[in-house]
Image (spheres, rainbow, N blue to C red):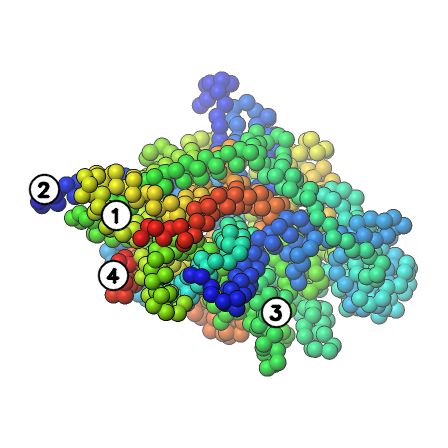
Amino acid sequence: MRPKTQFSRAVVTALLLLFSAAFAVPFVWLLSTSLKPIEQTLSLPITFLPRAHYADLDGRRMEVTLDFQVTQAGAVVRLLSGDDAGKLGFMGAAQLAQHADSAVVVHPVAAGSWHVTQRLDRATGEGGPSPLWDVLPRDRIDTHIKFRWENYPRALAALGGDAESDRHRVGFWTFLANSLTVAVLGVIGTVISNAIIAYGFARLRWKGRDAFFALTLATMMVPFPVLMVPLYGVFKAFGLIGTLLPLWLPTWFGSAFNIFLMRQFFRTIPEELSEAARIDGCSEWRIFWRIIIPLSTPVLVVAALFHFIFAWYDFLGPLLYLTRKDTYTLAIALQSYESQNGGVQWHYLMAASAVTILPVIILFLFGQKSFIRGIATTGSKG
Amino acid sequence: MTRNEKKQFRAGIGFTSLWIVGLAAFTAYPILASLYYSFCDYSILKSPVWIGLENYQQLAQDGLFWKSLRNTLFYAGLSVPLGTVVALGLAVLLNSEVRGKSAYRLLFFMPSIVPIVASSMLWLWIFNGQYGLMNGFLNLFLTPFGLHGPAWLADPAWSKPALVIMSLWGTGNAVVIYLAGLQNVPTELYEAAEIDGASAWQRFVHVTLPSIAPVVAFNGIMALISAMQLFAQAYIMSEGANGNGNASDGNPARSTLFYTIYLFSTAFQDLRMGYASAMAYILFLITAALTWAAARFSRGQYEDAV
Amino acid sequence: MHPAAAAEPVHVVYWEKWVGVEGQAAQAVIDTFNRSQDRIIVDYYATSVPDRKTLVATAGGDPPDIAGLHEQNIATFADAEVLQPLDDFIHREGLTNEEWLSRYYPVYAKICTHGGHIYAGISTPAVEALYWNKTLFREAGLDPDRPPRTLAEFNDYARRLTRHDPKTGRLTQVGFLPQDPGWWPWIFCDWFGGRLVEGNRITFATDPHNVAAYAWMQSFTKEYGLENVKALSSEFGPWASPAAPFFTGKIAMVFQGVWYDNYIRQYKPGLDYGVGPWPENVPGVKDFAMAEADVLTIPRGAKHASEAWEFIKYLNSANPNAQSREELQGAELMDFLQLKNSPLRVWSPYFTNHNPHPHIAMMRLLSASPNATCVPQIGIWQEYYREVISSFDRVRLMDATPEEALAYSQARLDASWTRYRKSLERHGQWAALGETAP
């Protein structure tokens, strides 16, 4: 459809801009988080720009983290008694008055000042000296925008496990190769097998076809959790557990989703084209190959793209069927940033995710070509 | 069968033979085994004991089964039609002649390729009652009336609508399929309609829709099947928003306890695989009935849809 | 049994959930074990959700030799015949079950046992304590070194640590909220002196102490107002993130585990906080605490069960005389590297005195306490736990009174328990289990 007037064109563009902005947010957020230091990730209210804060602590300029704002006036004091004797502490004004004898004021603090801590660049909480801290008014803290590109190499290095002693240490490239193997072999199998099968359902009339197709659709309606255990048994019986085969081999034998998808598209191709070829004495195979396939590039690309994405992000399959780290795919390896009890290295997770997304974007841009021809040139099909 | 019918049959079996092998090798056994288990007391490791219809009888009396079914039908009833309208609308917009089409297409597809662990954290922010984007927008209209947007995922009354809204972001897949479908609509039909003086809406209803009816049917049926089996998004969001380490119960207060989530915890936490299998086959029957009805309906509208 | 021991070492397959820092620690301990003898090599495979993976693989006849699980899996997995009892291995060491268990603090011994059998060894233990924000204590005029000692004091402190915005009246800070982190509402039942299971009966709603605990949990919503609490909780980030409410000073007191110090150092290094025992709730019950553990189990059908046992034995022992980091062994080495307490009664001098955990003494005190408690080992615990959470949601959202919520859950659990017993009877297991129910 062609927007006619200037006005309708402007409306279409405005709508598209609005929607695409909304749809782009997840990706922008992912990129921004991947460039933050960990203490700025998941902050509320959300911030998109990664920052660095600097202040003078102990007479030295250094990078600090903003911890929290003190709600009342008080003072930073050196404590004279209790468990923390000798250490610095913050006391509210009221408390200071009560405990004047147990603390020496270092400097007074106005309400609304920020508690800041020296930023020690360490990935984990282990070891090291305890960081310096202070409570300072906001105007004594300098804030700049700073992108932490170093997150990327660090995230990829951490993906394989850092321990030198790790016998099974494998890195990003192994995971990438495994993911590519599963995705590429799966895409080839998906496109070839499902196109052939769907042709049998879409363009041929034969006894039992519709019942068989209904059965095919029905297989998608049984929820997967109850199939998991017997399916594992099947792959075990074939001796495929622990290899990449369960993740791509089945795609060479069709899948209900893709059969259905391609069947629907093949049905939109006018029947007259096939009839004319049959009258010319073409075999069904030849009609499939010479007429249907050339007219079906868009749906083949769609099926390829979808399977690639599915295989690329599939978590459950690799989780069940892979056992050794050197066979892991990227989707499984991304779990490396999760630690016990759910702590997550968000900045690393996002950096590695951004790297993981890259091949999909490239593939999508390539696949676009099949759409770009647009209506004008496909008109001749009718 | 006549000779010609036999020939046709052979060709049909020939083209679908790969699938016959695939079905027999990878699909038939799991499906038949789980059907058998649905009549058994089966805890995965111990040998199944036949108990007839007991699982099905217990399901009828299981309040959570009904609750999860209601939750799922609510979600599917809203998300399937809304998703279809949004996806089809976006695809038609994208198929019109505007500048920078490929960039838009990529952007619309973006939510489908951002890993769900990453995007779920973003959604937690969007639906945050205090700082969230959603309420920031809504409050522009609500505040003058002294109202405030809800806590969404943390509020039992609003957690399902939040998931429906979230599902609209995932329509990129459907948009891509519709776009591929729109390629096959012959331009001549539009030109003829224009000559007849048809408005844009009339062209859409009388040219576009009938031409891509099979594609709409595909997207609609797939949306229905996946809505009935909704799992991952609901699971992750429930955990993230309520943070009590037990996402498998559809918190808060079981408002997002969807069918497959209940089925999953029955199967893998309680190890009641027989009961879960019975649930699976009830869902199968419901989904099949709904699909059949949808196919009947679309066949009534458009000859060639399913 | 192993005449060719020197020739070909046996590879033991060990599935575990830890990656990152904890995974590296586990690998270091395994390397030490592998070097300590030449008969067994343990291969560590990190995997997400090892419980489900173990279940599916064991059903498929292809289990690992060692599966790293959570303690709340033990009863369910044991009843479902996923796990093999370790009793025979222990007896082969010339020990009775009681003698073996005497190495642990009582609560960890309890964690390893179900139905009179030992099913697990500890891989790493945890214990939960009271964490409080000293800065907020000082602001509220409370002694930052003196945590509340009784429930009454705790409630009083919670009130005094609660702040409202003077202009809008909105809640800006609370002393305590039971939903942070909200993982263990059931522990409050124990803390109030309640029992979740009594003999062969579910006592969730029938034990008045449990109702009292839920009423206490609801009292925070009642006092602050539901809308106020909702608005404030919207400002909470995930518990292990810089925006976690305890790290941003929005909650002043929280019950958290031994791992929490590590997260504080990572996300909020400037936090001034204290760690102490649970306040006394039932008069006379001092040093109440909650303990948990990640555990090592041997699935049925494991190909190298006796070698797997050797590793479990190693990881549940230590060198009591260790004077240096190099001399640490087994449990102590793992817990040293993972910054945890040790589940064993005897701690070596080095582990005690050079522990990198800043509050290790408190953690030891609590885990050694005779009043430390853990999840009940009952086969329907997962379902029970979901009811615990659901009831908690309902009372804190003012959707039900504690009595109503617990009665609803009790009815469901009674039916489940009846059904579960029937299933065990069907498989001929109930007779053995029934006598030793929790």
Give the residue drawn at x 51%, y 51%: B102
Mark 2 vs mark 1, foreground winner is 1
Letter of the chain that mark 4 sits on in the rendering: B
Q: Which residue is mark 4?
A: B303
The residue marked by circle 2 belongs to what chain? B
Residue at 35% of width from left, 46% of height from top?
A296
The residue pinned by badge 3 equals B136
Residue annotated with mark 2: B3
Identify the element where label 4 is drawn.
loop
Residues marked 1 and 3 touching at CB (< 8 Å): no
Image quarter hosting the N terminus of chain C? top left
Please say if C151 is above or below A89. Answer: below
Q: Which residue is nearer to you in this view: B6 or A67?
A: B6
Q: Do tags 1 and 3 sit on the same chain?
A: no
| Residue A222 shows in this picture | no
Residue B273 image point, x, y percent? 35, 51
From the image, tell me which residue sits under label 1: A273
First-in-chain label (3 vs 2): 2
| Mark 1–mark 4 distance (CA, rounded to whole Å) | 19 Å
Kindly report which numbered mark, 4 or 3, lies closer to the viewer in this rendering.
4
Q: Are marks 4 and 3 on the same chain?
A: yes
Chain-order first, disc 4 or disc 2: 2
Q: Amino acid at mark 2?
A: Arg
Q: Residues within 10 Å of mark 1 (few under 14, many from 20)?
A: some
Instruction: Examine the rendering and report whether any part of residue A259 can be seen.
Output: yes
The answer to whether dots 1 and 4 both sit on one chain is no
Q: Residues within 10 Å of mark 2 (few under 14, many from 20)?
A: few
Q: Amino acid at mark 3?
A: Gly
Residue B123: x, y in percent? 55, 60
